[in-house]
Image (cartoon, rainbow, N blue to C red):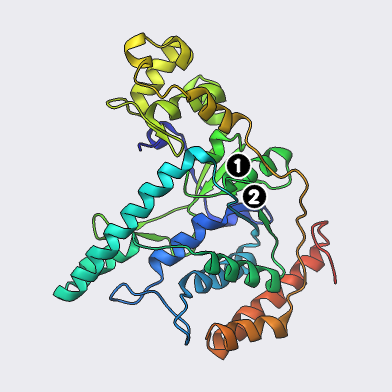
Amino acid sequence: MSSIAPIIDRRKISLNYLRGKVIAFDANNMLYQFLALIRMPNGSPLRDREGRVTSHLVGLAYRTTRIMLEYDIRPVFIFDGKPVTLKREELEKRREARDKASREWIEALRRGDYRTAFSKAVVSSRLTSSMINDAKKFLDLAGIPYIDAFADAEAQAAYMARKGDVWAVGSRDYDSILYGSPRLIRYITISGTDFLPSKGVIKPLTPELIELDTVLKNLNINRRQLIDIAILIGTDFNKGVYGIGPKKALKLIKMYGCIEKLPSNILEKIPKNFNEVRNIFLNPRVIKEYSIKYRNPRKEELYQFLVEERSFSREKAEKIIERLEKISFKLRQTSIDLWLNK
């Protein structure tokens, strides 16, 4: 599957630009990042004393509290619901890719090739239901809001952004702008680096702001046409047309207006249910009744969960709780209407 990235305008920003802004994060997307990168030198994930993976929890606890305290970013986490039927094929492909990477990781460890082992381990990450439950438990005890989406987290986040309940969607993927989010922030990271497993190199990262209106204006198209371009090159819900990349797809849609009017030799290569895919982006199923409230952390319960249940060191747990106490104080001082003092 290709990406619309090459035709998307983006603007480099700093984390300071996001101060005071509420961002809806694609939680599953973020947890996968933590699972991929927070690992031992041989590629093994961090685990608690019972052998449960905690890499995702370490990343969530540290990164979230830091961006909230140091940059006044106010996160809302959106978790994926039940996947749309058309997405199951894509999810199966991802599972197969992870299985292959896992086998290659083990083989690299046997050879003592730790560089290759780490790169394979990065793409072998699996996000289980128990890991997701751990993440939700942390957020609940920390007083940080989260929402379970009906289906795709980015669809829910985009809906909330369109309503003005959040300022932007935070994700590395581009689907939220296809769903109509007015803004997408990519790479909300403090470390400023990313590991590219295919190349075995570390890439510097800077936060990027993508504004839907700017994208559409510069391309001289509407959102429906942007969705048609995505369908031509391939989405999570359909295969793209072989030989058609983002720039060619843009040229075709600008020339003919929409998929239905494309020449027959191209139209016959597009899945017959393309209108169903288009409708997923135009009219996604979302939860319209939800609450965004920041609460005081339940310190004793959080300490118990992190230290006694998930093997965090006392010092690390105390640091996280100290940050949360400072965050809750700052939120009360600003008297924002999202704060619920309990």
Q: Report the Cα–Cα distance between label 2 and label 1.
A: 8 Å
Q: Is residue 176 left or right of residue 195?
A: right
Decide which of tag 2 and tag 1 comes sooner along the chain.
2
**Number of the front mark, 2 or 1:** 2
* Residue at the extreme left: 111
Q: Is residue 294 above or below residue 88?
A: below
Quarter of the rendering containing residue 41: bottom left
Amino acid residing under circle 1: Ala
Secondary structure, mark 1, is helix
Q: Residue 39 has which mark?
A: none
The crowd level at tag 2 (other Cα within 10 Å; few <14, some 14-19, many 20+) is many
Quarter of the rendering containing residue 162: top right
| Quarter of the picture holding the N terminus | top left
Secondary structure, mark 2, is loop
- Badge 2 vs badge 1, beta-carbon distance below 8 Å: yes
Residue at 58% over, 28% down: 279
| Quarter of the picture holding the C terminus | bottom right
| Residue, disc 2 | 149
Q: Is residue 98 above or below residue 327?
A: above
- Let me know if residue 188 appears in the view: no
Q: Is residue 97 above or below residue 214?
A: below
Q: Is residue 160 left or right of residue 250?
A: right
Q: Position of residue 161 (x, y in %)?
A: 67, 42
| Residue, disc 1 | 155
Amino acid residing under circle 2: Ala
Q: Position of residue 270 (x, y in %)?
A: 39, 22
- Let me know if residue 122 appears in the view: yes
The crowd level at tag 1 (other Cα within 10 Å; few <14, some 14-19, many 20+) is many
Q: Position of residue 191 (x, y in %)?
A: 44, 65
Q: Position of residue 339 (x, y in %)?
A: 80, 62
Q: Nearer the viewer, residue 226 or 87?
A: 87
Residue at 83% over, 62% down: 335
